[in-house]
Image: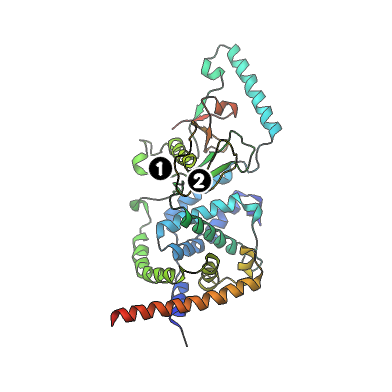
Amino acid sequence: MSNDYDDLAARIAAREYRIDPAVADRHLSALSGLTSEPAPPVQSSRRRGRVILVAAVVVATAGAGIGTAAALGVFSAPPSERGIAHCYATVDLDDPSNHTDFMVAVTPQERDADGVGDAAAAALEVCSGGWAQGRFSATDPKVSDPHPSRTDFPVPHLVACVLPGGSVGVFPGDDRTCAVLNLPSALL
Amino acid sequence: MRVLDGESAAYADLYRRHADRVFTHCFRRTADRTDAEDLTAEVFTQVWRQRDGVHLDEDAGLLPWLLGTANNLLRRRHRDRSAVVRLVTRLPVDARSEDHADDVAADLDDMADLRRLSRILRNLADRDREVIYLCVIEGLTPTAVAKVFGEPAGTVRARLSRALQRARAEMAELKERHDGGDS
């Protein structure tokens, strides 16, 4: 004899739903930003090489009389990928477990005249919340689950840089942090 | 599978092939279209990040792993409703497809059933509840679910048997309470 539960389960199992095509397009667009970023972490030796390269550029540009900001390697760029961003616990692109990826939504109210929003500001807001909830810590490079109730963990000064794939990476640090990583700081 | 090697085009194909199934599962679990959309995006983000650890089932392909990932995210979401993530690929209503309004209207008819099932299963252990959704509602085999759970197939079958028994009893009790309330 059929049980009411079995009837209910059969009804639910028989129905299928479609994701809204406009939402699917948005997902695919955001996810393509994730896949276009370099999958393997940068090797330490390569990074050291890049930092040395930055230093060489700094010396060369300073010698050429270029302005102080450029000489210090402080340069900026807008992110080309605004759908995905990343919060880093440490200033390290090599560690595969020191960051989280998330999707950024910029609401219509937050869009500028060109129809794009400030992905860097949205990412800074999200990452700041992550630090306040204890997901990131100055004493542990690994990302943790958020504390179930506290939201008063210390939040360091955070900076938004543009990663090689074009998305925003938020790091603890100061004005020089992006340059140390040989990354531009993120503009609107 | 190509996506496990990190090919972007294969990843997009994977999304197109499985997004509706993942979305359907998430909608059945949440009874909320927007939450289900967010979860679907999260699942595919996880696929990319954890592609080295994917458990492939020969018969069902990646689907069991995708749905298992959705369940992990749902469990985590229940623990932490205030999660950091502005996880958001949310679209304003006026940016949605034209037939979306029809879908939403149809959803409303199904909500009562989805919520009733959720209420019946809410007192079950997480894994017992998930085995009902995966095996009974999604039609996965206990063997496929066993690989996702990392448990022997026999354990999953035992869970399923126990969970079904409990679900039927909960349903009967709910009906009795409801009928009693009517009288």
Q: Nearer the viewer, residue A75 or A44?
A: A44
Q: Residue at x 55, y 38 (%)?
A: A137
Say above or below: B5 vs A172.
Answer: below
Pointer 1 chain: A
* Residue name at image x 69 percent, y 27 percent: A49
Circle 2: residue type:
Phe
Q: Mark 1 belongs to which amino acid?
A: Val
Q: Residue furthest bottom?
A: A1
Q: Secondary structure at mark 2?
A: strand
Q: What residue occupies the far right of the structure in this picture?
A: A45
Looking at the picture, how far across and down is residue A81, in whole percent?
50, 40
Q: Is residue A182 left or right of residue B107?
A: right
Residue at point 46%, 85% (across, down) = A2
Q: Residues within 10 Å of mark 1 (few under 14, many from 20)?
A: many
View extreme (left): residue = B183
In the rendered view, would you say A94 is above or below A1?
above
Q: Which residue is mark 1?
A: A106
The chain holding disc 2 is A
Q: CA distance from mark 1 to mark 2?
A: 13 Å
Q: Secondary structure at mark 1?
A: loop
The answer as to whether the residues below labels 1 and 2 share one chain is yes
Badge 2 crowding class, 10 Å Cα cut-off, few under 14, some 14 to 19, many 20 or more, is: many
Q: List x then y, in percent, for residue A179.
A: 57, 26
Image position, residue B86 (x, y; %):
44, 46
Query: Disc 1, disc 2: CB below 8 Å?
Result: no
Q: Which residue is mark 2?
A: A102
